[in-house]
């Protein structure tokens, strides 16, 4: 595979939607050296320019692109609820460039994206059909990681 390196961008330019920019907007995974110093404004402009194309190709039922959470969903509806595993976390260590807590961890510290979108009635009819019954993040953790779940719950009760 040939690696392509991009020159750092100027403050005002928003490039075409290549694999690096798509990954940054969809997942929040980016290398700061590839973007201008004012990363928030750059990502905002890039989302405005490429929003329709990204959403037209979005395939993950019960989820949304990372940048949509940061610029549209969280500012309008608030952050996802914390789970009981989040007790005592240092919030500053988890917030992103926009100042929001939006993460998927094991054990879960926030409700799942599906649960959040379902609770706020933001899922499409198609997503509801594909997802079926939505299992809360803590319950999914108990099912998927029973040993770790048991260890954590035993620690909490002692």
Image (cartoon, rainbow, N blue to C red):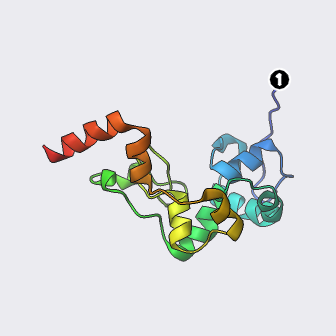
Please say if 77 is above or below 59. Answer: below
154 on left or right of 19: left
Question: Is any atom of residue 38 visible in this view?
Answer: no
Q: Quadrant of residue 82?
A: bottom left
Residue at the spot 24% in from the left edge and 44% down from the top edge: 153
Q: Farthest right residue?
A: 16
Q: Quadrant of residue 57?
A: bottom right
Residue 141 image point, x, y percent? 41, 45
Q: How many marks?
A: 1
> On the rendered image, what quadrant is the N terminus found in?
top right
Residue at the spot 41% in from the left edge and 64% down from the top edge: 81
Tell me the SS state at disc 1.
Answer: loop
Please say if 155 is above or below 46. Answer: above
Please say if 151 is above or below 121. Answer: above
Question: Is any atom of residue 35 visible in this view?
Answer: yes
Residue 47 image point, x, y percent? 74, 62
> On the rendered image, what quadrant is the C terminus found in?
top left
Residue at the spot 77% in from the left edge and 61% down from the top edge: 55
Q: Which residue is mark 1?
A: 1
Residue at the spot 26% in from the left edge and 36% down from the top edge: 151
> Which residue occupies the foreground of this view, 129 or 92?
129
Residue 96 image point, x, y percent? 52, 54
115 on left or right of 56: left
Q: Farthest top residue?
A: 1
Residue 116 image point, x, y percent? 51, 65
> Which residue occupies the foreground of this view, 126 or 108?
126
Q: How would you rate the neighbour count of disc 1 (Cα within 10 Å): few for under 14, some for 14-19, many for 20 or more?
A: few
């Amino acid at each position: 595979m040939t690696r392509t390196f991009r020159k750092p961008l100027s403050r005002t330019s928003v490039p075409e939607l290549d694999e690096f920019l798509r990954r940054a907007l969809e997942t929040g995974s980016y290398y700061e050296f590839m973007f201008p110093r004012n990363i928030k404004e750059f990502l905002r402009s890039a989302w405005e320019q490429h929003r329709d194309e990204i959403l037209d190709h979005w395939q993950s039922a019960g989820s949304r692109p990372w940048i949509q959470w940061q610029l549209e969903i969280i500012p309008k509806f608030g952050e996802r609820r914390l789970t009981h595993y989040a007790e005592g976390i240092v919030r500053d260590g988890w917030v992103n460039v926009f100042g929001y807590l939006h993460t998927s961890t094991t054990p879960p510290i926030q409700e799942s994206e599906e649960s959040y979108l379902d609770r706020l009635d933001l899922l499409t009819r198609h997503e509801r059909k594909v997802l079926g019954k939505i299992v809360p993040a803590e319950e999914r953790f108990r099912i998927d990681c029973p040993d770790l779940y048991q260890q954590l719950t035993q620690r909490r009760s002692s």
